[in-house]
Image: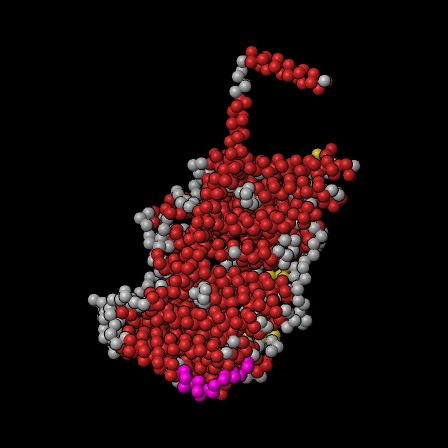
Amino acid sequence: MILQPATGIFTFTWVLVALPLLGAFLILVFGKQLKKIAPYLAIALSSSSFVLGFIMFLQMRTRPAGERGFVSNVYQWISSGSLDVSFGLQLDQLSIAFVLLITFVGTMIHIYSLGYMEHDENRGRFFGYLNLFVAAMLLLVLADNYLLLYVGWEGVGLASYLLIGFWQNKHSAATAAKKAFVVNRVGDFGLSLAIMTMFLAFGSFSFSAVNAGMQNAQDWLALTIGLLLLLAAAGKSAQFPLQSWLLDAMEGPTPVSALIHAATMVTAGVYLIVRSASIFNASEAARNAVIIVGAISLIAGAIIGAAKEDIKKSLAGSTMSQIGFMILAAGLGPVGYVFAILHLITHGFFKAVMFLGAGSVMHATNDNVNMRRYGGLSKLMIFTFTTFMVGYLAIIGIPPFAGFYSKEYILEAAFSHSIWVGLIALFGAGLTAFYMTRMVIWTFLSPPRWEDGVHPHESPKSMTIPMIVLAIGAAVIGFALTYNHVFEEWLEPVTGFEKPNAPISVFALTILTLTVVAAGVIFAIYRYRTISPTTPQEVSFLTQAARKDLYGDVANETLLMRPGQKVTKGLVTFDEKAIDGTFLGVANMVWSASRLLRQTSTGYVRSYAAYIVGGTLLVMFLLLIARL
Amino acid sequence: MSLLLLALVLTPFVGALLIPVANKYFKWSAKFTGLASAIVTLLLALAIAISFDRNSSSLTQFDFKVSWIDVFGISFHVGVTGIGLVLVLLTAVLTPIVLWADFYAAVKRPILYTSLILLLAGSANLIFLARDLFLFYVFFEAMLIPVFFLIGIFGGANRAKAAMKFLIYGLAGGLIMLAAIVALTLIATTQLQRSTFDIATLSQSISLTPMQEMWLFLGFFIAFAIKAPMVPLHTWLPDTAEQATPGTSTMLIGVLDKIGTFGMIALVLPLFPNASAQLAPWIIGLAVVSVIYGAILAIGQKDMRRLFAYTSISHFGFIVMGIFAFTTIGIAGATLYMVAHGLSTAALFLVGGHLIKQRETALIADYGGLTKVAPVMAGFFLMAALSALALPGMAGFVSEFMVLTGVYQRYQAAAIVATLGIILAAIYMLWLYQRVFTGPENEKSNLIKDLSSKEVIPLVPVFALLILLGFWPQPVLTTIEKSVANVMQQVDSVDPAPIFAIENKEQN
């Protein structure tokens, strides 16, 4: 696809980013003065961004498929020697899909936060951070080169850091925030090196230059850049081996978990890989690495999600697992890119609705997150229950809910890649059905196990309305996007597309999948006939491991943190004793030498006379020796 | 136009002398006189920056030259290079900010303090502008004096020891450089049949044997590696930063230490291009050690000011790497890095200084949970921390990326290891922020007062510049462009071409 210089409304692409950025700036700088109106300002700006994006989308649809990509150079950002980076925005079919998702779900979650954060004294700041996040995320998906993408990439990381640690006086929140940022920096290490390698190879890192350059580059280059990008994606998208931060990130307020740590930011890794299609197309090894990382995360996330009692952590495990699905799909190449993005969008809706539902449940139970102390909420919280059920049916993939379509296509693509990848994905689908059913039973359908003083009640309208809107999305968007292959045709000019060619028919595959899903559901129903309100300790090794996030943190601690602490301690001592000690030692030697010599300056004439005589004799003696 | 430059050079010195006089006869406060002359200097620097011809490839502009010691061919010769200009601007921006900020730190002898800061700024300017090696050397040594007194009189409990350590390191470096200068001019005298200290002449018209060049190179390089401390010559810096006032530390690390890295670009590369090229891999290696070592040491510090000092050691490693990569992007990035680092150091020390001043302790463990009592301070501190860890959107990011890219063009392994520094930077900065500002409040948190608007004012320009240069570094990059090209030419280096050519280039 050839990108065109932006004309008409598309010259205002920068406004999409600028609106929420303005909101963040105003709210964070003039917080005191704007205290009352800050939430409304934030909502207004985020929704204006959506409206503008939607108008652009409509405009884009009127144009022929090959002419829907636009580049607008806002200004020259960095120019030095052969380095020439523009602050350029690229609006094409892929980025507009993200723009709509981010601003729509983002606005809904802004509205939900009105109710959820009503009693928080710092809620102005909260809305400022939300706007900052939306702006950074839009920059991430609109940048026309990797370095500008990096700015958005780290910008969302900053917003995530600020929001995870929003309740800063909680020690655990502050620690989780820092952990998220540091682990993400490990991913950034990959992204930095990928960008530098692109520059080394092509002298540029704009998308178009890299795409053009990959055509006559060698395999090793595609593999190197591909693996580095995968590292970056793993960091941002909480994929193995950089997954550990996501579960801790649930320390943040629940709307944040819904928006950032489920619907949008964590999927940025998928965007990165799909955006870099030309690189991954050129290296099968890199694609295989992507599939492996996706598959491991898919299964591991589901296992963790099945063992957690904390509803948010269980959902976080689920997010890791679902993103594993997307990453796996992206690793399949042109056959999977479109479906990775499709699943990303449907997931954005159904996971957001479930997180918001979880927040609503917590709201009703004095901020309890332990599902063992829920139960019986289906009648008391009718809107929450219904919307949550829509999300549930969507995620486990029951037709006609959204997740069914996207997951089915991914399975088809996976089976057409190889039977093993297909089976792993299928197994993941079964696990999903199991742990989600478990969550629904524990929270809504089993008898109440509430703590004392808990009086569950439905949440205010500001919270239920966004949930209803998102639930409608979770119900219909899968069908709407796949009807007549609109989404494939829409993205094809950007990502390329190959028809899946699975060894079994689509109908058979659907039946197979639904059977596996049903098995998962039935097993969960059978298993959780009764639920103990306390944690049983006599459990299998796998459950124990899953409760501990499959020892991810233990591994990090023993392999990185503790050795790191030892090295730090050792070097501090080394610096003090060896380096500074050496210089001090020299200084002390000079000092002692001078003290020794000082003793010769006694001030007595007789000793000076003796020195003179001694010196003269010495000189004469030396002269004599020299003569001989 | 040369008079403009002369005015710029003289204003801080005049101001320094004027302060006691004006105080005695006109009852002008030291703050007023000091700030006034610092602001005049800033305006002059801006005037020069505006009239500086960015398209001219001549080595220097605005040359001002008068004969000084004729017998030895020494002259008072100053001139503006692009790289020198941005550092003069950095100094000119930071001086009024430091003077403004530190007066709220209730300095005990304001007249002396202000004069010393101005003397220091004036000496720094002369070093950045000197085109005569002798002039350079004189002020390279002379600036030790104001710093010595700034630490020794206004510093903390162990100030005497710290000041002495600073002085001895400085003098040792200066002495080694003096020996190299004498040797270099002796060689010049025999070759040219006349004595000269003119930097341009020395770099262009002298031929040195490889052995001579190597030794002379080392003489200069060691002096500069002490000033912009590289491991293992760094231990004076944490001790000094721990004892000095925040303002002094800002000037010392933000401006004076840049003389080391500036000297490498302005003197070492042009005077000894062959030795520089030959030893570059070793120096890059040493710089990588500095980057990682400084960062790890920063993680292990218990005292905030020592932590800042170690982060700077890490950052100086980046700058030196950029310089010795011998690529346009590397050298330009290193120069931009100097500016960014100067600003972010100022941000850290000034915001941290407000904290330390109130509780009279810089131990991290003494703090905790301050966001609630001091939200504005927390916000500024976090922004300072983010600028130090080179968050994209702030000046540090562009420069760090440029340095790493410039190095990666020639030394991939070194760049990869140095890139690990971005992870370590996140650890040392955010862990510091976490320990000081987040978590439960401790019983002494209520002793902290938030920043007043008077205290915020001097911080605003620093942060505004950090963000502005993050999104729009071009003002600095175009200013230094020709100057960097000249350096590349002097060391006879050509940027490596991309490995794979792109066919349709217009798509960029």
Residue B290 drawn above or below residue A74? above
Query: Magenta includes B29?
Result: no
Residue ranking furthest to the left: A452
Q: Residue furthest top?
A: A606
Query: Seen in the image, is A44 located left or right of residue B200?
Result: left
In which quadrant of the rendered view does residue B57 lie? Answer: bottom right
Q: What quarter of the picture does the N terminus of chain A occupy?
A: bottom right
Quadrant where the C terminus of chain A lies? top right
Name the spot of residue A594 as percent of width and height, x first: 54, 26
Residue depicted at 49% across the width and 72% down the height: A291
Residue A506 part of the magenta-drawn span: yes
Of B411 and B315, which appears nearest the observer?
B411
* The quarter of the displayed image where residue A103 is located: bottom left
Q: How many marks?
A: 0
Rendering colour mode = secondary structure
Residue B107 relative to residue B446: left or right? right
Residue B70 appearing in the image: yes
Q: Which residue: 29% across, 71% down?
A: A361
At x 50% / y 58%, what residue is drawn? B391
Percent of width and height locating residue B233: 55, 42
Q: Is residue B53 visible?
A: no
* Above or below A39: residue B202: above
| Residue A419 horizontal/vertical position (percent) | 48, 79
Numbered range of the magenta stretch: A497-513
Q: Is residue A222 left or right of residue B2?
A: left
Q: Where, by quadrant of the figure, is residue A507 drawn?
A: bottom left
Q: Is residue B453 above or below residue B183?
A: below
Q: Position of residue A569 (x, y in %)?
A: 44, 47
Which residue: 32% across, 74% down? A439
